[in-house]
Amino acid sequence: MSTLKNWQDLPYGGVIVEAGSAAKYETGTWRTWKPVTHREHCSHCLKCWEYCPEDAIILEDGRDSSGAARKFVKEVNYFHCKGCGLCVRECPVNKDGKFVALGFVRDEV
Amino acid sequence: MTNVTAGKPKIVPITGAGACAQAMRQINPDVVAAFPITPSTQVVEDFSAFVANGLVDTEFVTVESEHSAMSACIGASAAGGRVMTATSSAGMAYMWELLYVAASMRQPVLMTLVNRALTGPINIHCDHSDSMGARDAGWIQLYSETNQEAYDNLVMAARIAEHPDVRLPLMVCQDGFITSHSIQTMQLEDDKAVRAFVGPHKPYHSILDTDKPVTWGALDLQDYYIEHKRGQEQGMRNALRVIQEVSDDFAKTFGRQYGLFEDYRLEDADIVLVALNSAAGEIKEVIDEMRSKGEKVGLLKIRSFRPFPYVEIGQALSSAKIVTVLDRSASFGAHGPLFTEISTAVYNYSPNQPLLLAHTFGLGGRELTLRHIEHIISESRICLDKGEVGNRQGLWVNVRGDKL
């Protein structure tokens, strides 16, 4: 069942009357390549989270070696990730070249 | 409200541009953003004096270009204001992108368009290439033969454009110089009566309403764009009814009745001329003269070109034997835009099929004299007697090197 509305049910002129509704838009359907996290190599520097234009890097709470609270990279939100690859390119671990913390693989159709 | 006179209507001598400026003063819009361009300059010039003299409450935005003028109009309209502007020719061409934005965002911006030729070679005089080029932009287009009609159309404009079933921008067109700079006497209605007729503006999802935040102008892709366009088209279809309703109410209030078009001595006419704007005045003069000599000739003058009243015009032309359409703009490689619309109306909605004859005239202000109109009617008569238009089809009028 389609949730898309008929023209008669739309407000005029494409006005969006609900704040923050962009979060409901599945930009994930645009993706042809997808980033994949390899947490065993991730330094949790959060560069990927910083660069992601869709806010699609999901973080989680944790503690560093000294016991202080900090954020860690958890996973990619594929509902919003449109596969631009910015995170893969900016990842310092990837740049270093010894390991791949963020892989970039052909997405399944 | 500032400085509203209450009293009787006045008969005043005024130019077409001045008449529209007066209508703007009486409407007292929230925002006017405009950039002066010949021959529409006097509209904005007069109005800026009203602003400076405190006769209106309008925020007058002086911009650096027409692109900015229309952008400011759209923004102000989305903010919930009643918004007006004026332009001509190249000025409107510079608004092109924004004309579409205003219409697709359903912002009822009101414009006085003083028709002027588009450049190439540069020319400041009248033809309809500017508004005809913009005919697919989604604006309602009302045409005006006289100063009175330009004024009346602008007084009616807000109620048509802002009607909840319509919500579309509207341009009132008049002929550059011929109408805009010619002083005619007309009835200037009382300020209070005009403001009462126009009524208050009701904003639609204003971006200034911070309790209900909205987004205007968001990206719209394959999943919704065409639905929004379909809604826009419905606004235009509804406008046919609303234009007539507002015109009927205008007639009740001010005594002058307008339709979607004017039929002049049409009921028994064999030969029907079709025209827009000021040329209709001369054509009526010639019709009266030729009628007295026994030629059954009439005029159909289009007021609403967008939306185009196909059904009504098809009916109105149901007893005509030849319909000669005078286009004041050229669509190079095709017949003029008015001719193609009339052909559509006749073919689909008229019970009989008159001959159809296309003529182009008056580009860049070239005059159309009474003699030319007489000649066009005589040529139409020849076509009618022969039963075909033959090689007269598509001739240009009063062009050196062509016969007509």
Image (cartoon, rainbow, N blue to C red):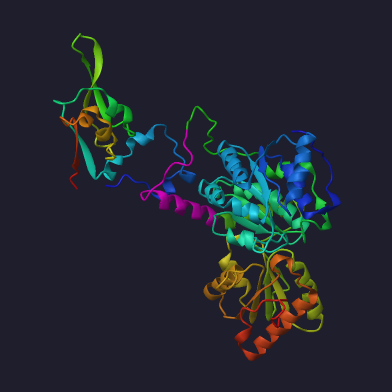
Image position, residue B307 (x, y; %): 57, 59
Counting every numbered tag in the picture gives: 0
Q: Is residue B343 above or below residue A54?
A: below
Q: Nearer the viewer, residue A30 or B56?
A: A30
Q: Is residue B171 visible?
A: no
Outermost residue, left direction? A40
Is A66 left, or right, of B89 in this rendering? left
Q: Nearer the viewer, residue B251 or B358?
A: B358
Which quadrant of the figure has residue B149? Answer: bottom right
Which quadrant of the figure has residue A57? Answer: top left
Q: Is residue B155 visible?
A: yes
Is B105 left, or right, of B255 in this rendering? left
Q: What residue lies at 36% left-to-right and 51% top-to-bottom? A: B222
The magenta span reads B214-237
Q: Nearer the viewer, residue B238 or A75?
A: A75
Q: Is residue B194 above or below residue B367?
A: above
Q: What residue lies at 41% left-to-right and 53% top-to-bottom? A: B226
Image position, residue A71 (x, y; %): 25, 19
Image position, residue B47 (x, y; %): 75, 42
Q: Is residue B212 above or below residue B221?
A: above
Image position, residue B404 (x, y; %): 71, 81
Q: Is residue B258 above or below residue B391?
A: above
Q: Reply yes or no: does residue B345 show up in magenta.
A: no
Q: What residue lies at 72% left-to-right and 52% top-to-bottom? A: B40
Outermost residue, bottom direction? B386
Is B48 left, or right, of B392 in this rendering? right
Is B176 left, or right, of B206 in this rendering? right
Q: Reply yes or no: does residue B229 show up in magenta.
A: yes
Q: What residue lies at 82% left-to-right and 80% top-to-bottom? A: B292
